């Protein structure tokens, strides 16, 4: 019997979550148009947007959790990864219930950025890590790309707290670009 491949499982989970999120986004756009919400008072539009955010939050949270598990997959064994997934899932569900989805997503992104920074530093130091790709450039590019994606998501989540953080946005964009060039 073939062993479960974590990378493949995480990829399939990410694809399914992105597909569902895409369906929600496209469906809500058509609903907005067909329900003639463009001509309602601004407060109704804000309430509609908040409702769509609440519907999207579990999908985004799941996608970020998959991304967060992809990062320590480079560092940890399957046993420790399963334990980490359970702990992170429970912690995030608790934060979600007690403090709301925005703080849960922010917490997940901060944890992910710490993990990915550690992975990037280990790749830069030449340590052997568990990557699907071979070669220093590809591993460095993958690490930069993952860190850039986490920081880009963090920029979006922080909009609700601090306003636009242009330095973080441009850092994330630069890391993503450099990562794509190296991969």
Image: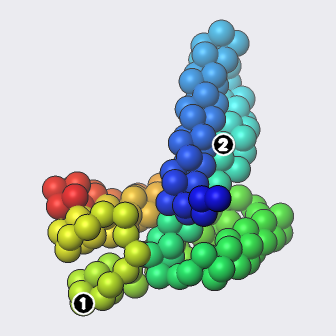
Position of residue 165 relative to residue 81, above or below, is above
Q: Is residue 69 left or right of residue 93?
A: left
> Can see residue 15?
yes
From the viewer's side, name the closer residue of 157 and 173: 173
From the viewer's side, name the closer residue of 154 and 89: 89
| Residue at x 60% of width, y 76% of height | 78
Figure label count: 2
Local secondary structure at mark 2: helix
Position of residue 80 relative to residue 21, above or below, is below
Q: Position of residue 22 (x, y in %)?
A: 56, 32
Position of residue 9 relative to residue 143, above or below, is above
Q: Position of residue 86 (x, y in %)?
A: 74, 73
| Residue at x 64% of width, y 25% of height | 28
In the image, farthest residue toward the front: 1
Of the numbered discs 2 and 1, the one sitting upstream in the chain is 2
Give the labeled residue for mark 1. Answer: 125
Q: Which mark is residue 56?
A: 2
Mark 2 Cα within 10 Å, few/some/many (few <14, many 20+)? some
| Residue at x 28% of width, y 81% of height | 123
Local secondary structure at mark 1: loop
| Residue at x 32% of width, y 69% of height | 143
Q: Position of residue 84 (x, y in %)?
A: 66, 78
Q: Position of residue 157 (x, y in %)?
A: 53, 58
Q: Is residue 112 left or right of residue 172?
A: right
Mark 1 Cα within 10 Å, few/some/many (few <14, many 20+)? few
């Amino acid at each position: 019997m073939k062993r479960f491949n974590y990378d493949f499982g995480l990829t399939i989970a990410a694809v399914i979550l992105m597909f569902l999120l895409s369906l929600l986004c496209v469906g809500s756009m058509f609903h907005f148009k067909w329900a003639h919400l463009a001509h309602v008072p601004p407060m109704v539009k804000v309430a509609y947007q908040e409702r769509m955010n609440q519907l999207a939050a579990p999908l985004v949270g799941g996608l970020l959790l998959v991304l967060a598990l992809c990062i320590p997959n480079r560092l940890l064994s399957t046993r420790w990864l399963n334990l980490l997934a359970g702990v992170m899932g429970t912690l995030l569900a608790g934060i979600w219930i007690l403090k709301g989805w925005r703080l849960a997503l922010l917490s997940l992104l901060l944890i992910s950025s710490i993990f990915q920074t550690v992975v990037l530093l280990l790749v830069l130091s030449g340590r052997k890590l568990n990557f699907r790709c071979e070669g220093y450039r590809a591993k460095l590019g993958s690490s930069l790309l993952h860190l850039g994606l986490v920081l880009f998501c963090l920029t979006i989540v922080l909009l609700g707290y601090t306003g636009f953080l242009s330095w973080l946005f441009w850092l994330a964009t630069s890391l993503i670009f450099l990562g794509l060039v190296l991969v």
